[in-house]
Image (cartoon, rainbow, N blue to C red):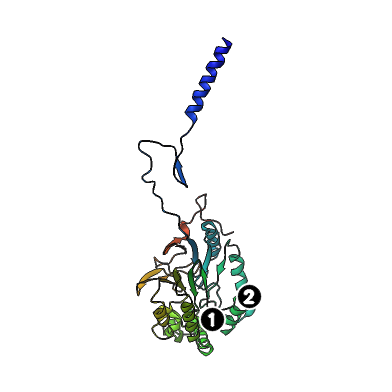
Amino acid sequence: MKNYLLLLLSLIAAIGCKQNTATVVKVSPKFTHDITSGPKPWNSETFEPTEDDFTFAIISDLNGGEREGVYATAVQQLNMLDPTFVLSVGDLIDGGTEDKNQLQKEWDSFDDRTAKLDMPFFHLGGNHDLTNPVMREFWENRFGPRYYHFVYENVLFLMMDSEDYEEKRMIEIYEARAKALKIIDGEIEGKYEESEYYSMPERRIGGMSSAQLNYFTKVLQDHPDVKWTFVLMHKPLWMREDEKGLGPLEDVLSDREYTVINGHFHSFSNTIRKGHSYSILGTTGGSQNPQDSMAFDHVTLVRMAKKPVITHLKMDGILNEKGNVPSPH
């Protein structure tokens, strides 16, 4: 009887082992399952092939009235999204001063917050960052060139300076701006819309020197076969129609794939110009017009595959695992 019970138990164990042995169906190196016949609870087994791509992010205007905590929150969100690197389109500090101690304080504040990013960050100057010759010199001592380029994974990035004026003209703009701000603050009489600064084309669309044009023309000639070219600037140089605008460089760009991105207006828009995408970003902490539905805080995520896939993510929709906007602290 004892031998019979042992034989019966062995048989039951063998049957149990056989029932628990799963058949693994290998569809691809990344996808396996155990359903060998009949309908399946998914609609396709054809997955997008693995691509050699990378993702980068862009932040927009912080200033013109920075709202506390917004950029620090964006840094936390960018770390959650984990792009390869982060770019900017300018107005990173309040600026507009010749006080070097104040500039040191403002840039230290920005760079201390930016240092919390887990990936590289590329500076680019706006009108708040490059308001006068003193600020221009401060920038060059701290960050190097005001305009530059780099290539990553055969994608070319042109980082432009839209405040690229001769020093005399820069001082004229700076002094006119200072007077206009006094009108806005009520320190002197007048209407802002009637001020000299308000009528200056540089206030809205900036300017570019022939030296910068020559630099980027040479860069494009030296990199004829890149997969894509991104052109970043603060003010929309492409809206200026004379030789100080983007037009001459657009002629050089015309035989390649490229995308233009800028900030400055604190209101998002996109247009197709000469067959290419031109985007004006909103804000990442800068002042907003409450009546403007396109004035919102966001970060831009670009997945660079065969061509760029651009996604603008509103910051109030980027939530952590608890379902909350992450704390800026």
- Residue 191 seen from this side: no
- Name which residue lies at 59% across and 69% down: 110
SS label for mark 1:
loop
180 or 285, nearer to the observer: 285
SS label for mark 2:
helix
Residue that sits furthest to the right in the current view: 101
**Quadrant that contains the C terminus:** bottom right
Considering only vertical position in the picture, is 205 above or below 49?
Answer: below
In the rendered structure, which amino acid carries the disc numbered 2? Gln
Question: Which image quadrant for residue 269?
Answer: bottom left
The percent coordinates of residue 200 (x first, y second) are 44, 85
Choose the circle earlier in sequence order: 2 or 1: 2
- Spatial separation of the CA atoms under disc 2 and disc 1: 15 Å
Residue at which label 1 appears: 131
- Name which residue lies at 44% across and 65% down: 296
The percent coordinates of residue 320 (x first, y second) are 52, 53
177 or 139, nearer to the observer: 139
Mark 1: give few (<14), some (14-19) or many (20+) Cα within 10 Å.
many
Tell me whether the residue at label 2 lies in contact with that at label 1, contact meaning CB atoms closer than 8 angstroms: no
In the rendered structure, which amino acid carries the disc numbered 1? Thr
103 or 312, nearer to the observer: 312
Residue at which label 2 appears: 104
Point out which mark residue 152 bears.
Answer: none
